[in-house]
Image (tube, rainbow, N blue to C red):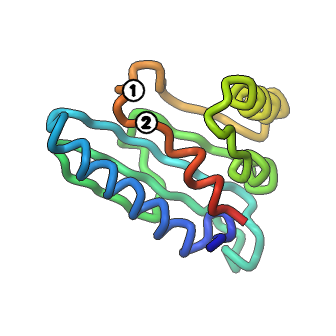
Amino acid sequence: MKYVFASPGWMAFMHGMVAERASRLAAEAPDISWSLCEVFTDPPASLSADGAPIAWHVIVRDGEVTFAATESDAVEFKVIVDYEGVVPLGRYDTRGDPDRAAELTAMSQALIAEGRMQTIGDRSNRDPRIGNFHDPIARVTA
């Protein structure tokens, strides 16, 4: 099944994926935590009738998951990005290939250089046990 990027179905898939991973990690690493927020500006009318940005955030602490379709500043990493600009990134599956991962990074850097994407915070200290969320979501993004 495929979901339109940032649609309610896409958000539900993301929530389920995060909850499953947090549950699995809680057993082996109960102290693991992470948080992030993505904000998509200028979304299509089919997703936001009034043109308001679409956002989601997740906070994982002590095995508990808080997930909401709202913007939050109380996160470690936040991305604010133009909807049309980010859709190709959202669909891009790196397939675990380092060269494709580098291409995805270059695509993100291009959006930043164009002023269409802003990041706040630092993901470099993110625990590697959290793993990759990008590729699984890319595989179901229409």
x then y, percent, for residue 69: 46, 65
**Circle 2 SS class:** loop
Distance, label 1 to label 2, CA atoms, is 6 Å
Residue drawn 23% across the image and 34% down it: 32
Looking at this rendering, what residue extends furthest in the top direction?
A: 124
Against 45, residue 79 (above or below) is above
- Snapshot quadrant of residue 131: top left
Q: Amino acid at mark 2?
A: Gly
- Snapshot quadrant of residue 139: bottom right
Question: Contact (CB < 8 A) between labels 1 and 2?
Answer: yes
Against 96, residue 55 (above or below) is below
Q: Residues within 10 Å of mark 2 (few under 14, many from 20)?
A: few
Q: Quadrant of the C terminus?
A: bottom right
Q: Which numbered tag is attached to residue 131?
A: 2
State left or right for residue 25 relative to residue 104.
Answer: left
Judging by the rendered image, the residue that carries numbered circle 1 is 128
State left or right for residue 106 relative to residue 6.
Answer: right
State left or right for residue 95 relative to residue 59.
Answer: right
